[in-house]
Amino acid sequence: MDDIVAKRLSQIQEDGELYEYDFEMNEEFENSLFELADEIADLSKKLTGEDPKFEKLLQIIQVKQKEDNNRVIIFSSFRHTLRYLKEKLASRGIRVEQVDGNVADEVRFEMRQRFLLDRERASISEGKAISRA
């Protein structure tokens, strides 16, 4: 959470703008943003490690994994959410890939090819380049 807040604050400072709105940054407004950022950082430190939404998602994925068509796609507009889910799912033994704007087209193609394979063939192909059949 600290990284997200710090990144956004530095972005505001560099750009001198907040999102697409056209208004001037003044010292009072900038100070209130920093105070709000500090408050968010303090609140985030009080969060527990519990994540009931993730646990529910994991349950759904585990049920889906027992089906013949066991593929799951999760969409998010936020890379940090995707990264969080990828790390949490991988730590629970779920095979997962993250596709976002930073992933090269060739890698996307390989991921898509692995995604289309059945479970056994996908496991064998992990870590190897996939050729077209």
Image (tube, rainbow, N blue to C red):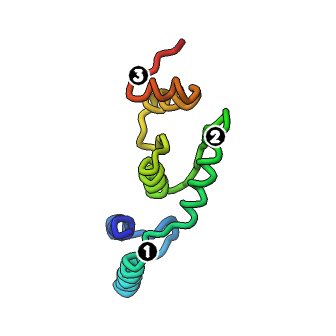
Left or right, 69 with respect to 132, comes to: right
Where 74 sits versus 69, above or below? below
Distance (Cα) linking label 3 and label 1: 40 Å
Mark earlier in primary sequence (3, 1): 1
Label 3 SS: loop
Residue 79 is at least partly visible in this image? no
Few, some or many residues within 10 Å of mark 3 (<14, 14–19, 20+): few
Q: Which mark is residue 129?
A: 3
Residue under the image location 54 percent in, 60 percent down: 54
Residue under the image location 55 percent in, 32 percent down: 115
Q: Nearer the viewer, residue 48 or 28?
A: 48
Where 6 sits versus 59, above or below? below
Q: Which residue is mark 1?
A: 48
Label 1 SS: loop
Could you say where residue 51 lies in the image, as x and y percent from the top left?
A: 51, 67
- Quarter of the image for residue 29 reads bottom left
Residue 24 is at least partly visible in this image? yes
| Quarter of the image where the C terminus is located | top right
Distance (Cα) linking label 2 and label 3: 27 Å
Please name which of the two marks, 2 or 1, marks the residue nearer to the observer.
2
Give the residue type that dot 1 points to.
Thr
Left or right, 73 with respect to 97, comes to: right
Give the residue type that dot 2 points to.
Lys
Could you say where residue 116 lies in the image, as x and y percent from the top left?
A: 59, 28
Where 5 sits versus 81, above or below? below
Outermost residue to the front? 66
Q: Which mark is residue 66?
A: 2
Few, some or many residues within 10 Å of mark 1 (<14, 14–19, 20+): few
